[in-house]
Image (spheres, rainbow, N blue to C red):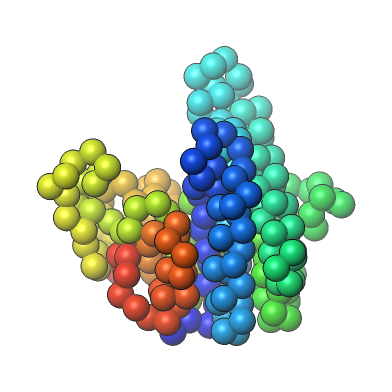
Amino acid sequence: MYKRVLLKLSGESLMGDQSYGIDNERLEEYAQQIKEIVELGVQVGIVIGGGNIFRGLSGAAKGFDRYQGDQMGMLATVINSLALKSSLNNNGVKARVLTAIKMEPVGEFYSQPKAIECLENGEVVILSAGTGNPYFTTDTGSSLRGIEIKADVMLKGTRVDGVYTADPEKDPTATKFDEITYDEIYNRGLKVMDLTATTMCKENDLPIIVFDMDTPGNLIRVIKGEKIGTLVRN
Ligand code: UDP
């Protein structure tokens, strides 16, 4: 179905059942799912969040300066990216970390041509440090990178299996959409991603599939066109 994808993983889901940090089993599960689609010949860019380690906003609530807090958050995404790269490498998958903030030799400084070159060579590129700017999120980072690398689709792997009329973890009457437009998301006030990220996808016509990444095998199902999750489009 898809030749090139941008996979967005939340930092929080890397925690598994822990309350902080990186759960090795979850990391390994993700690496195996990614390996399956790489072996199909899909070009994979990945953006991973940092909320399992640090979030700028919650830092600011505890008294950190927001600018500094966001920098800490961006560094948290780099830690997660390195962990995922290591896990992919252990599974025999070639992967490279590119960073939106200069920090060689931790990762190479991101540029669009470099990212595309790696993808065309069959390497997984992990696009870390978000957008490199405070006051943004990794959802916006993944919209931006997805558009830049000309991904066919953004795959937003979460612990929920799609977009619902209300938060299914709080409202048992919530029902799931198989498909929804960006406009409906605005009109219903649904929180799929933050509005900056959603608007970037809408304006640049990048469809999103929201799906449950925590069930092994789901990533390859999405790639093969199985209708799991929710497709968000114009
Ligand atoms: N962040 C930022 N600019 C970006 C991306 C992320 O400042 O372009 C910071 C921000 O502080 C955020 C943290 O990094 O709270 C972690 O990212 P995010 O919250 O998106 O991770 P997730 O919630 O997906 O785990």
Looking at the image, the residue that sits furthest to the right is: 105
| Rendered location of residue 69, percent (x, y) | 61, 28
Q: Is residue 156 left or right of residue 86?
A: left
Q: Is residue 9 left or right of residue 103?
A: left
Residue farthest toward the left in the current orientation of the protein: 173
Q: Give above or below for 91 relative to 144.
A: below
Q: How far from the left and from the top, in percent, is residue 146? A: 53, 65
Q: Quadrant of the N terminus?
A: bottom left
Q: Which x, y percent locates residue 154? A: 46, 66
Image height of 191 relative to 19, above or below: below
The reply, left or right, for residue 149 in relation to residue 196 is right
User: Is residue 68 in sight in this rendering?
Assistant: yes
Please name whichever residue, 99 or 1, is drawn nearer the observer in this view of the structure. 1
Q: Quadrant of the C terminus?
A: bottom left
Q: Quadrant of residue 30?
A: bottom right
* Residue at image coords 42%, 61%: 215
Identified at 59% across, 45% down, the residue is 23
The part of the image, by quadrant, that contains residue 155 is bottom left
Q: Nearer the viewer, residue 115 or 42?
A: 42
Q: Is residue 43 visible?
A: no
The percent coordinates of residue 117 (x first, y second) are 73, 76
Residue at 65%, 40% (x, y): give it: 76
When the figure is inspected, residue 38 is found, relative to residue 181, above or below; the finding is below
Q: In the rendered image of this protein, does residue 232 appear above or below residue 138? A: below
